Image: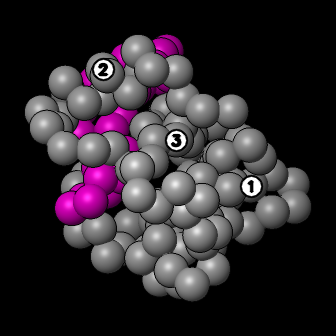
Amino acid sequence: MPVPRPLRERCREFLGIDGDIRYVFPATAFGGGAGFIFVVTDDQIAVISTGETSRSTPKSVWGSYPRGTRIGPVESGAGASFEFAGAVFEVDDEYVAVVNAADAEIFDRDSLPKDPLPDL
């Protein structure tokens, strides 16, 4: 399920991004607690904290990393989780494909499907 457009726009304004946002997905701290939004652009991976009470209102930038930083792999089992920048995050199963696509775009471009309309 895609992240709602208003959330994407809040993240864009909060970060002051003029360019394209490639991927956005929500995550939580492992075991519950604070919420986060991962925003992937052509240049960076920004991790925004939303605090414990809201999952959709950016509060602060937890960290900013070069786009060449791997986000996954996502471990599945009792829940989908991944380690990033020394912390462990949980993500809903529906966003595992988003994490994998963000990594594949940088680290395994040949695994991405071909653009069906490359001239548009």
Q: Is residue 9 magenta?
A: no
Left or right of 107 on screen, residue 57:
left
Q: Secondary structure at mark 1?
A: strand
Whether pointer 1 and pointer 3 mark residues with C-beta atoms closer than 8 Å, the reply is no
Query: What residue is shown with label 1?
Result: 80
Residue type indicated by callout 3:
Phe
The CA span between labels 3 and 2 is 13 Å
x then y, percent, for residue 99: 57, 58
x then y, percent, for residue 54: 47, 16
Q: How many marks?
A: 3
Q: Is residue 60 magenta?
A: yes
The CA span between labels 2 and 1 is 26 Å
**Would you call the spot at circle 2 few (<14 residues within 10 Å), some (14-19), or many (20 or more)?**
some
Q: Foreground mark, 2 or 1?
A: 2
The residue that appears at 41% across and 58% down in the rendered structure is 119
- Between 68 and 32, the residue placed more toward the observer is 68
Q: Is residue 51 above or below residue 106?
A: above
> In terms of sequence position, does the residue under pointer 2 or pointer 1 come before the other?
2
Give the magenta range.
39-62
The residue that appears at 16% across and 38% down in the rendered structure is 17
Q: Secondary structure at mark 2?
A: helix
